Image: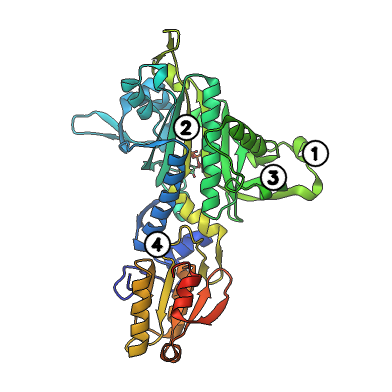
Amino acid sequence: MRLSRGFIPTLKETPNEAQIASHRLMLRAGLVRQTSAGIYAWLPLGLRVLRNIERIVREEQNNAGAQEILMPTIQPAELWRESGRYDDYGKEMLRIADRHGREMLYGPTNEEMVTDLFRQSVKSYKELPQNLYHIQWKFRDEVRPRFGVMRGREFLMKDAYSFDLDHAGAVASYRRMMLAYMRTFQRMGLRAIPMEADTGPIGGDLSHEFIILAPTGESQVFYDAAFEEIDAIAGGYNHDRPDDLARFFQEMTSHYAATDEKHDTERWNRVDAGRKREGRGIEVGHIFSFGTKYTKAMGVTVAGPDGKPVHPEMGSYGIGVSRLVGAVIEASHDGSGIVWPDSIAPFKAAILNLKPGDAACDALCEQLYAALNGNALYDDRPDRAGAKFADADLMGHPWQIVVGPRGAAAGSVELKRRATGEKSEVTPEEALRRMGQG
Ligand code: ATP
Ligand code: MG
């Protein structure tokens, strides 16, 4: 993308409605704009990040054997009456009526709908297990939408739903998703910690929230430093091996970790003083295992091995895809702007042409732009160098390639790594090679 033609409306001033860094930076770098309270339009730069996060989430869900579907945002009230949640859900649910007066709602989650899809088609235990997921917009009429996309009213969620014949199967599905989640967050450069959680309106017996640390987090968290050494990717855990899943689950649940709601001072006091860690946390995912709650309420059975009807056991697994854009920024920014992890950056690099119109600068920039094949934002605007440096830092591209007239004449560029600030004078070929693009 050429910046002179791009729709990337950056702001110099700090918008005063934004209380936390990620919200300020998302507005200032031109990622999103609010259209009404808690509802945002995603602009080109922001959408590229959202799509990159979605891609990682999707790859890890698919890897873990979940199958992607796409359920609608609008649901019939009827289904929610069957589960008994239509009245329980309260004011957070946006209720609407169609022209025939039929009661509908904008889905805040999809347990009922997926259970209905399942019951229409699955008749035998032989078709189990199943795990279905989608990445779809949700609406929750939050009392106090705030912090930009972190607590919106309309937000993008990945939600998966597992169906198993028995409890042992449900536990395996739960562990498989826990592994997928840890891998997902790690690939985004985040250290997430699973913490025991209340099951809330979804109900059930086993539940973990995935929390990342950031000073602006909404809850106080307490955890054992052992979590700082866990590597879900290098650990070599296989989703299909029950022993691996058990070993992984053991590793994830044997050390202390709790949010303030579930904090147990007695257990906390038993943690070695040198390993106690405390801070603020942001919830980026939440998984539940709730047995036959919905299959019983909605009368769903499959034929079991002995021919008798069985209620399948379910679990549901959410990731806040749009919240993650803000959460990653909370975890990775500095005084000059965003510092994107390579895996989700909107562009791998910015090419800064310090003298547009200079034949050598233009030629070198065009050559780099072509070599980066859609993965670079080319700052070809006729602006001052200072403004270009500031915008590139603000937008947070992992690399900056600075092309000035003196270097261009001598066949060199300056390569800067955003995360460390490290700069080096290299040939264009060497710059591409260091970026893994040569
Ligand atoms: P919270 O405790 O933050 O209100 P929740 O427990 O109600 O979230 P879940 O039903 O577990 O949320 O939804 C799964 C995930 O969706 C959450 O872990 C979070 O990342 C994301 N999420 C929930 N509510 C919002 C929201 N209002 N805006 C953005 N993301 C959200
Ligand atoms: Mg939750």
Is 190 situated left or right of 137 in this image? right
In the figure, is residue 358 to the left or right of 162?
A: left
Q: CA distance from mark 4 to mark 3?
A: 33 Å
Q: Kindly check if marks 4 and 3 are in contact, taking CB atoms under 8 A apart as contact.
A: no
Q: Secondary structure at mark 3?
A: strand
* Depth check, front residue: 181 or 284: 181
Badge 4 is on which residue? 31
The tag on residue 223 is 3
Residue under the point 53% across and 62% down: 21
Mark with earlier residue (2, 3) = 3
Report which residue position mark 2 lands on: 316
Q: Position of residue 361 (x, y in %)?
A: 37, 86
- Asked whether mark 2 and ligand 1 are closer than 8 Å, the reply comes as no
Badge 2 element: strand
Mark 1 in CB contact with mark 2 (< 8 angstroms): no
Find out whether the residues at labels 4 and 1 contact each other: C-beta distance under 8 Å: no
Gap in angstroms between the C-alphas marked 2 and 3: 25 Å
Question: Relative to residue 295, is residue 438 depicted above or below?
Answer: below
Crowding at label 4, few (<14), some or many (≥20) Cα neighbours within 10 Å?
many
Q: Earlier in the sequence, mark 4 or mark 1?
A: 4
Question: In 3D space, how far apart are the residues under numbered discs 4 and 1 (Cα atoms)?
Answer: 45 Å
Mark closest to the chain's N terminus, 4 or 2: 4
10 Å crowding of disc 1: few (<14), some (14-19), many (20+): few
Mark 3 closeness class: few <14, some 14–19, many ≥20 residues within 10 Å? many
Q: Identify the element where label 1 is drawn.
A: loop
Kindly identify which numbered label has been placed on residue 110. Answer: none
**Amino acid type assigned to the residue bearing label 2 in the image:** Ser
Asked whether residue 37 appears in the rendered view, the answer is no
